[in-house]
Amino acid sequence: TSPTYQVTILEASPGLGGTFVNKVYDGARLVSSKYITAFSDFRFDEDPAVCPNHPTVEQYVEYLERYAMEFDLVKHIKFGCAVTLVEDAPRSNGSGDIFHDTDIIKFGCAV
């Protein structure tokens, strides 16, 4: 059987999209095509009238939101959580610490 993992994603932004929402210029489009950018299990719409070959940043963020909803990923994301330091603090159980502002969040590992 395949191993299972408990995953927590730490995201500094209040929602999905990160840099694509906060640090982008007006009219920006993706440099890579929708065929290369999409996840293999969740493709962009093939119709160029719906989604051009190089989606706008807004279309990409909408795609990420649909992906997260489709695969029920939002419950694993801790929004508004900027990581300030990841420290290797091995213990007998192999766990480490991730520091968020003044809080310390304990995880088995950080990737």
Image (cartoon, helix red, strand yellow):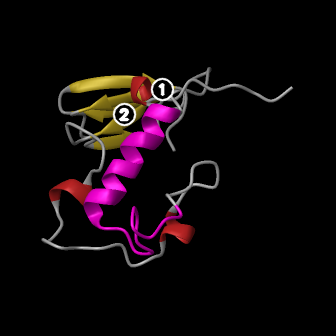
Residue at disc 1, secondary structure: strand
- The N terminus - image quarter: top right
Residue at disc 2, secondary structure: strand
Boundaries of the magenta span: 46-70
Image location (x, y in percent) of residue 37: 50, 65
User: Is residue 110 rendered to the left or right of residue 59?
Assistant: right
Asked whether 70 or 14 is in front, the reply is: 70
Q: Is residue 60 magenta?
A: yes
Image location (x, y in percent) of residue 2: 81, 30
Residue at the bottom extreme?
31
Say the numbered circle drawn on residue 107.
Answer: 1
Residue at the right extreme?
1
Q: Residues within 10 Å of mark 1 (few under 14, many from 20)?
A: some
Q: Earlier in the sequence, mark 2 or mark 1?
A: 2
In three-dimensional space, the C-alpha distance between marks 2 and 1, rounded to whole angstroms, equals 7 Å
Asked whether 17 or 53 is in front, the reply is: 53
Q: Is residue 13 magenta?
A: no
Q: How many marks?
A: 2
Going 49% across and 27% down the picture, which residue do you hit?
72
Asked whether 93 or 42 is in front, the reply is: 42
User: Is residue 55 rendered to the left or right of residue 39?
Assistant: left
Q: Amino acid at mark 1?
A: Phe
Going 56% across and 69% down the picture, which residue do you hit?
35
Whether label 2 touches label 1, CB < 8 Å: yes
Image location (x, y in percent) of residue 96: 48, 30
Q: Is residue 95 above or below residue 27?
A: above
Q: Label 2 belongs to which residue? A: 98
